[in-house]
Image (spheres, rainbow, N blue to C red):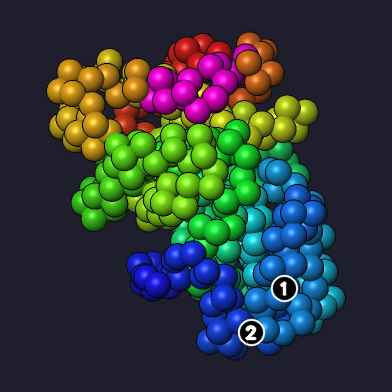
Amino acid sequence: MPVMTYLTTCHFDFGALKQLGPALKAQKVARPFIVTDAGLKAAGLLDRAVEALGVEPAGIYADTPSNPTETAARDAAAQYKGAGADGIVALGGGSSMDMGKAVGLMVTHEGPWEKYGGTQRGTKLIGAIPPVIAIPTTAGTGSEVSVGFVLILDNGRKETFVSPKLIPSVAICDPELTLGLPPSLTAATGMDAMTHCIEAILSPVNNPPAEAIGYDGVWRGIGQDMLERAVEDGSDRDARWHVMMASYEGALAFVKGLGAVHGLSHALGRIQDLRLHHGTLNAIILPHSLRQIQQAGVMQEKFVRLRQVMGLGPNGDVADAIADLNRKIGIPASLSAIGVKSEHLAPSLDYAVSDLATASNAIKAGPAEYEKLFEMSL
């Protein structure tokens, strides 16, 4: 079984969940607090994690919302403190893993939470949090090895919190846990991972190792057709392994930044009434953002390499290829198809422009550029 140390230690392979008990002991966690969601509890994955703990959990929070909120995180943090817990097991997709990190922040820091988000100053204010062992059950966000988490604050902002202190102490990536994912969720989370890889590659920040990892993630997910295979046949173990690796790599890559796809996705994702899936938003917006970048005539050498790793010919169009992949795996064709309307732009525009991901977009992304991107995606 590969045990990789890159930003943090990751146990990666079928059966890796068995490493949960030893990982807790290594982190000297005697009273683990599990953060997960109701769907995983109903599906029996929570029971499997509890069995692998080796100790009784101090408490379980299984009410993580699809888009984690400050209110929910405060509730979970209060339960953590009340249980006398000394570490966190975050089991689930990006929402549960982000919630686990948010709980870690809240039990060791004082609010208001706005001061820790989105800025260099906020990053500097974040200190050590309890040990977090992250166990992804989807292959998309890469939160199990990422430096941040996203939380919808009480002020309405969908804020990104970033610090090396937020990287989980241990990641346990067991593709076995993804075998039951339905095709729609496999597609949405997989495209989240592909967006991480591609936006990180195109970010102008100079970090060749992270960029190389991003190319490998795109090669696995798209160039080798592993994402399409995983959607078509959820029991394809080889495809599940590679798609989870691509997700892991996406988070390693985006230490060099993301871009306007995430800026707009975060802004629209804060609309509580719509309850939009982050990965689906990214997938819909991505080809249009790529067209904006292509039309600007920048990053051409990166598009050459993207065509290579995606298996396209020298004249292939990366944006068209992503749109075609979306169609094949059942991603909705437009934002309007998932309930977004033209009137959602105005209240989202400032959030998108000021989002942390916007600063590392391949081209300038101001109000005019975001208006155009929204219109193209709608």
How many numbered marks, from 0 up? 2
Label 1 vs label 2: CA separation?
14 Å
Q: Is residue 189 left or right of residue 35?
A: left
Quarter of the picture holding the N terminus: bottom left
Which of the two labelled residues, at mark 1 and mark 2, occupies the earlier sequence position? Answer: 2
Residue 63 against residue 276 in the figure, above or below? below
Label 1–label 2 contact, CB within 8 A? no
- Residue 326 in the image: state x and y as whole percent: 47, 25
Measured as percent of width and height from the top left, residue 121 is found at 49, 57
Q: Which residues are magenta?
A: 322-336
Q: Between 349 and 67, which is closer to the camera in this rendering? A: 67
Q: Is residue 260 left or right of residue 256?
A: right
Q: Nearer the viewer, mark 1 or mark 2?
A: 1
Q: Quadrant of residue 44?
A: bottom right
To which residue does mark 1 refer?
Answer: 50
30 shown above or below 293 = below
**Magenta includes 246?**
no
Residue 305 appears left or right of 173? left
Q: Is residue 191 visible?
A: yes
Amino acid under disc 2: Val
The residue wearing badge 2 is 29
- Residue 127 seen: no
* Front-most of residues 319 and 261: 319
- Looking at the magenta stretch, what is its main secondary structure? helix
The reply to whether the magenta stretch includes residue 331 is yes
With 217 as the anchor, is 267 left or right in this view?
Answer: right
Identity of the residue drawn at 32% across and 27% down: 363
